Amino acid sequence: MADLNSRTWRKATRSQGADNCVEVALSGSTTAIRDSKAPEAGHLTANSAQWAVFLNALKSGALDG
């Protein structure tokens, strides 16, 4: 994901009004993740397999505190 400026960054619809949000930009087999409050601070990337594992863990409640 070379040029992130041309990507569309999305925030979860459920996070509206919250101060602890992340944004994602999807591109083929790569997902970029950044803090919506500090987008200039950089981003993380995950391949499609890593992203799928993460999403499944979230949906199953495995990451609930």
Image (cartoon, grey):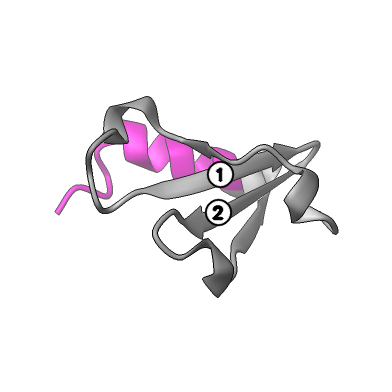
First in sequence: mark 2 or mark 1? 1
Q: Is residue 21 left or right of residue 17?
A: right
Verify CB contact (< 8 Å) between mark 2 and mark 1. Answer: yes
Q: Secondary structure at mark 2?
A: strand
- The amino acid type of the residue labelled 1 equals Val
Residue drawn at (78%, 41%) of the image: 29
Task: Give the residues drawn in magenta, as a range.
Answer: 51-65
Q: Is residue 35 magenta?
A: no
Q: Position of residue 35 (x, y in %)?
A: 44, 59
Q: In this rendering, is residue 41 above or below 39?
A: below
Q: Secondary structure at mark 1?
A: strand
- The amino acid type of the residue labelled 2 equals Ile
Q: Quadrant of residue 3?
A: bottom right
Q: Position of residue 56 (x, y in %)?
A: 43, 35
Q: Position of residue 58 (x, y in %)?
A: 34, 40
Q: Check disc 2 and report the residue beneath it.
A: 33
